[in-house]
Amino acid sequence: MATNRITYGQSAIAVSQPPANSDNTSNLTGLKRVQSASVNFAFARERFKQIGSPDYVGQVQVKNADIGLDVNYLYSNGTNEAMMGLNVNGEDGTALKYVKKENQDRNYYILMGTGDNQEANKVTNFKNKFNVMALGNVFLNSYSLSASVGSPVSVSSSLSAYNVVMNEYNDSTNGETIPAIDTTKVGPGAPVLDKNYKITSSAFQNTTNRDGNIHAAFTAGDIELILANVNEPGIEFTGSSPVRSASIDSLDIDFNIERTDLYGLGSMYPYGKRAVLPILGTLNFSALATEFTSGNLNTFLSGENNYNFTFNVKDNCSGQTGLQMVVENAQLDSQGISNTLGDNASITANFGFSMSDISGLKISTPPLIVNQPAASASAGGTLSVAATGLTSSDGMNYGADGFKYQWYTSDNYSVGAAATGSTFATDGTTGAATYYVVATNELGNATSNNSVVS
């Protein structure tokens, strides 16, 4: 059944964990706050002519189709970034930490409801209620984040895939066949036929019980820039030396990942996408200025100075940093200075910086609980969670994995000092109880889903 108008409740996108050729019946997570998604594909055909014939006499498919996916969303808490393959633990590495690691492709499932009042996070049975456009072996190609006073943080991303399958979700045999191409087999690549994907409402429910650390338009001061003194003529930010905390009006960070398809003999499907490193990231921002510094334009053009920037994007309700970005070794490419009578002086600056799996851009988020405790468990069993996000090396206040944990019962009663790890052994002698855990790092905390123990 077709649908003519897409509403928030009718449409959703679920993403699998890597690698793409694995089972997807229990590892799907829904992207948050998606505003638009578009899929395009073009066939790579070679057509042949013949002298004396007015028509083409043949054609051949020289490789797999070029399949693209563009996803635009409002930033929430880093879940989308983590699901796209970016590292959100800036203490442990750069955003592109996994870009050279093998088997990092994923599958994307775009759901479109076939009727009214079908919200993906509330539907208990998806059979015959949603059409699914399933994309296999998906890689991130570009990422662009924009923040400005008066607006929420928005992200535009583009991805590429090896295969696309479109069908109605029937769920006849524990789900539907995954769309991935098996890139690990010897010989020509072929679709994976022995693995399924399963659509459930839990994939689209709030996996951290904090759907967004950043949820409203920004006011002045909600985007904070911390940097050392900038030794370029014309640039002088608000704040005191030697560390300057500037009030940012707008901020844009962009990068494109150049990838090369790797083909083997006998297959039109690539067995991998090699990232060509380093890549060039760009940083553009505008800020209020106080005094203008003096200097020789020749120094400005020389590109001798490298700068490290730290951006803290805050929740304007709690003041908590919902996103921290560190740009390393950026060089000034251009700047603009505006000084208008009756208005504040302002500066726009454009920087370029090298990005790879070991340098460039670091992204840090509050905790994201990526593996929830079991929804139900027997008394005496062990509950466990796994978190990602910024980790701490402060062993006095944080655990070995860089987080603090505290388990609670459903009435918000702390279970005790023994329940301060990512795992918790329940008491087999007590009656039924409902438990959850709060994970904490230096940027904030996240609460897990409940687990009913009986």
Image: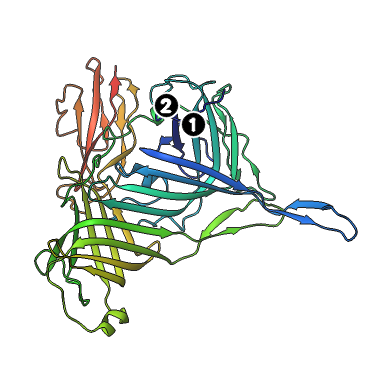
Residue appearing at x 59%, y 40% in the figure: 164
Tally the marks.
Answer: 2
Kind of element beneath mark 1: strand
Disc 2 and disc 1 in contact, CB within 8 angstroms = yes
Near-viewer residue (226 or 103): 226
User: Distance between the Cα atoms at labels 2 and 1?
Assistant: 8 Å
Residue 141: % across, % down? 47, 54
Q: Is residue 86 left or right of residue 306?
A: right
Residue type (three-letter) at the residue carrying disc 1: Leu
Q: Is residue 181 above or below residue 295?
A: above
Mark yes or no: residue 93 visible. Answer: no
- Which of pointers 2 and 1 lies earlier in the amino acid sequence? 1
Furthest-left residue in view? Answer: 240
Image quarter hosting the C terminus: top left
Q: Is residue 38 above or below residue 90?
A: above
Furthest-front residue in view? Answer: 341
Residue type (three-letter) at the residue carrying disc 2: Ala
Kind of element beneath mark 2: loop
Q: Which mark is residue 448?
A: none
Residue 234: % across, % down? 20, 74
Q: Is residue 72 above or below residue 242?
A: above
Residue appearing at x 39%, y 27% in the figure: 202
Image quarter hosting the N terminus: top right
Q: Is residue 280 left or right of residue 276?
A: left
Label 2 sits on residue: 120
**Within 10 angstroms of label 1, few (less than 14), some, or many (20 or more) residues?**
many
Label 1 sits on residue: 111
Residue 114: % across, % down? 51, 23
**Within 10 angstroms of label 2, few (less than 14), some, or many (20 or more) residues?**
many
Near-viewer residue (339 or 8): 339
